[in-house]
Amino acid sequence: MNRSIDLKVQSLFMSPAALVAAGIILPPLCYVLITSFQGDTGPLSAYKLIVESSLFRQTLATTLGVASISSVLSLILGYIVALHLARQHPNRRTVLMVLILLPFWTSILVKCFAFTIILGRHGIINNLLSWASGFDVQLPLVLNRVGLFVGMTNFLVPLVVLPVLASLLAIDSTLYRAASVMGAKPARMFWTVTVPLSVPGVVAGLLSVFVMSLGAFVIPALLGGPQDQMLSNLVDFYNRQVLDWPKASAISVILLALASIFIVPMALWRRRKI
Amino acid sequence: MANSVLDPLSRRYRFVGSSLATVVYIFLLAPVVVTIPMAFGPTNALEFPPSTYSLDLFRILFTSDSWLLPLYTSLKVAIFSTCAALFVGLPSAYWIARYEFLGKLLISGVLISPLVIPAIVSGLGIYLYFAYIRIGGTTLSLVLGHVMVTLPYVIVMIIAGVQKLDRNLEFGAELMGANPIRMFFTVVIPELVPSLISAAFFAFLLSFDEVIISWFLTGSDTVTLPVKMYSALEWEVSPVIAAVSALLTALSLLACIVTIGLRKSSGEEVS
């Protein structure tokens, strides 16, 4: 094919996407960046005020803590499910996958609503406990850290299962035959073949759920208490209540920078795999 | 038994593994399942299980303007943004999957970036940007915002679809004299139909469920269903939300079944 025709066809195929990239995807990031430098008293004033405020520091600590703990929790639960799925016959696995994909495809609002019903003071769990114990049990399970972790984990588990399952299924089955010919016992095969070879999926899953949970907004707002608000909620607070866009933008930039620390290795990891 | 993890487990561990997995399955499905009976409950109380069953909540949902208008807005935005995302995503995904070109890494990185950028950052940015170009609060702004969110998924799904096609058919068509555009329409698109359908379903669902970007873009007369639901959950939990949840869950189930069915019929592993 002629080189110039090639370029013409290429611009035909790529120009709508280029237009979206340049017209819709990039400008918002530029606007956030520019606005963050438009503080009242000098370009860095919004950052200075934010970094010095105890509200921000507290929220940052909450965000990092909640993101780490819920990532680890979802990795544990997700690994259990991925292992179970990986041991099934492919036909049966397809059926069981629905149990992962349906929650994965379910609106986060539906989940939050359901958890307020399940975990509320007069919710399903407290009712069951009251019925079983004979006392009026009213454990505070929602609008606090507990509710936040339950919601976050529920949301993140399917995101761990998919990459971990993919790496478990990619294990070459001759390795198991070799291990058993060499006399390895089941437990040893698990720890020396299955677990090490699932590491790529674990790393990919862990990185992506950690990045996802850094930006959590709906779950802390609806299932967490006032003490459990995360950076996204702080952005919304400055944008909607305080109407201080430089500060809201400065927090956004910090959040994005924080996420990038993990996004960049994730992108490199993916590229290496391809 | 090909394609499964084959380390043998003693009976005891197998049992422990399956029971733990069952607990996690229940944990994952509980919130999805709980809302269904609630949707058929009474209009004055949120209780599980409901004491009486009726269709009253659905009647309220489908007759009161305060829910019907958001539902209509969401449908409209989801349909337009899905079409736009497919229109933009199909040719670019094909080109990215098949050819090397200058700036490929840059443009595909930008197109995929909304997947990993925290939604609140995109949301705030798009709010500031659209306020500046004076289209904030319009349906157009919602559609554009949703294209940004759905496009990365559409592109990733179509690239995966293209990579499974036999490229020799495309070479063949070009050898027979079809120009690239004709070849694209007569050879590539027909083969890509299953990927296109699942990408369309996913984009539609993603847009229909989208909260955060919409939270920044809705005006008083362009409230979407998730935004309405989010503010209802934040301020006063109304039983009608149960009916909305059941509706959304039914939609997710449908999308899930269609996708799995399509992948099954094209004979690949679901994962």
Image (cartoon, grey):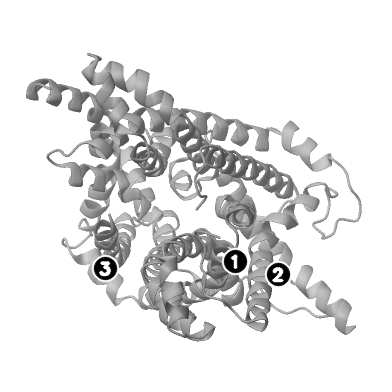
Asked whether the beta carbons under mark 2 and mark 1 sit within 8 Å of each other, the answer is: yes
**Residue holding disc 1:** A223
Q: Is residue B144 left or right of residue A15?
A: right
Decide: few, some or many residues near mark 1? Use Cα within 10 Å; few <14, some 14-19, many ≥20.
many
Q: Is mark 2 on a helix, strand or loop?
A: helix
The residue under the point 65% across, 75% down is B20
Relative to residue B139, is residue A246 drawn left or right? Answer: left
Precedes in sequence: disc 3 or disc 1: 1
User: Label 3, label 1: how many angstroms apart (C-alpha)?
Assistant: 27 Å
Q: Are marks 3 and 1 on the same chain?
A: yes
Which of the two labelled residues, at mark 3 and mark 2, occupies the earlier sequence position?
2
Q: Which of B170 and A79 is in front in this view?
A: B170
Mark 1 residue type: Leu
Q: Which mark is residue A119?
A: 2
Q: Earlier in the sequence, mark 2 or mark 1?
A: 2
Q: Which residue is drawn at 89% across and 47% down?
A: B53
Tell me the crowding category of disc 3: few under 14, some 14 to 19, or many 20 or more residues within 10 angstroms, Cα based. Answer: few
Q: Looking at the picture, does residue B232 appear above or below residue B4?
A: above
Query: Most extreme residue toward the front, as rendered?
Result: A181
Q: In which image quadrant can residue A123 be found? A: bottom right
Q: Does label 1 lie on the same chain as label 2?
A: yes
Residue identifier under label 3: A261
Foreground residue, A11 or B158?
Answer: B158
Q: In what element is the residue under mark 1?
A: helix
**Label 1: chain letter:** A
- Image-based side of A74 in relation to B229, left or right: left
